[in-house]
Image (spheres, rainbow, N blue to C red):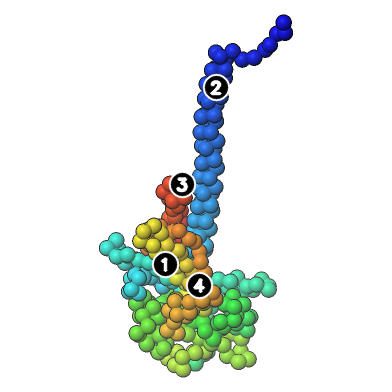
Amino acid sequence: MKNRFAFTMLELVFVIVIMGIIGKFGVEFLAQAYNSFIFSKINHELQSNSEAAVELIAKRLEGRIKDSVIAREANKNFDPIGDVNNSKTYAVLEWIGSDTDGFRGISDTTPNWSGIIDLDAGNSNTLVSPETNTTKTNTLIAILSSGTAGINDSAIFFTGADSDIRTGYGWDTSTTIINAQKGAMHPVQSVAGQPTQFTSSTGTDFSGVNIYEYYKLAWTAYAVAMEDYNSTTKMGNLYLYHNYQPWQGEQYDDNNDSLHKSLLMQNVSTFRFTAIGSIMKIQVCTKTNLIEEYSLCKEKTVF
């Protein structure tokens, strides 16, 4: 007789039970590992995107003219950033930015504009700014604005001057005080053959204007706006508007194209901002429903 080797019924039952246990917990383990991988990937993307958005906003805000910052509601009504209150829903943070790139200078160690006015020189028609080069400034502004602006679109803000935020910056397009050179922003242009001089670009000279020694040059305002809000998902998109001049009567969404509008972040659930004195705090929150509802917030304090 030949010996035959095979599973007994009892052994077969044990093998089936063990394989079932391994199959059950093995699949669960693989599913948990997969879910953990997906969650880590989503968390990393949300962390990276929200941090990049907050950092970009903060970097732009660092060069702000601090007295110019406002918060807008969806209907375009606005309040100075210091008057923001919880009874209103603000969708837009807006400010005028100093030309920090031109002040640093690009091609050499000297700035393109010095930020200093010689009070003993000039007259009611011209402002003399020693060590300023309006030709270089014009070239740089044209590069940064993709050819949509230049030195003749810029304005000067005198450091230390009194300013009415509601009428002095051009936020309210119904006012014409800017055109009379009596606002906080003084529209200027270059003087042919005189790279250290500015003259008014409004046709109104500087008579009656309080001229201060120190100034900041600006050629654009900035707006960060929460748009495309979906009431079902409770999320929207965050956009950055730039390359527009409020002192010329322009608003942030007048030119709704790629040269004036950039997408900062998608799937944003919250965009908040507040100010205490000259210190600002911004918060951006994002969320996803891919696996389960998961949200993440990033904050930044800007001095």
| Residue nearest the observer in this picture, 65 or 143 | 143
Name the residue type under label 4. Answer: Lys
Residue at 46%, 94% (x, y): give it: 203
The residue at which mark 3 appears reads as: 291
In this rendering, would 77 be left or right of 100?
left
Question: What residue occupies the far top of the structure in this picture?
Answer: 1
Name the residue type under label 3. Answer: Ile
Secondary structure found at label 1: strand
Residue at 42%, 84% (x, y): give it: 249
What numbered label is drawn on residue 227? Answer: 1
Labels 1 and 2 touching (C-beta < 8 A): no
The residue at which mark 4 appears reads as: 261
**Percent coordinates x, y for residue 206 in the rendering:** 45, 89
Rounded to the nearest angstrom, the CA distance separating label 3 from label 4 is 32 Å
| Residue nearest the observer in this picture, 183 or 194 | 183
Labels 1 and 3 touching (C-beta < 8 A): no
- The tag earlier along the polypeptide, 1 or 2, is 2
Rounded to the nearest angstrom, the CA distance separating label 1 from label 4 is 12 Å
Give the label, 3 or 4, closer to the camera: 3
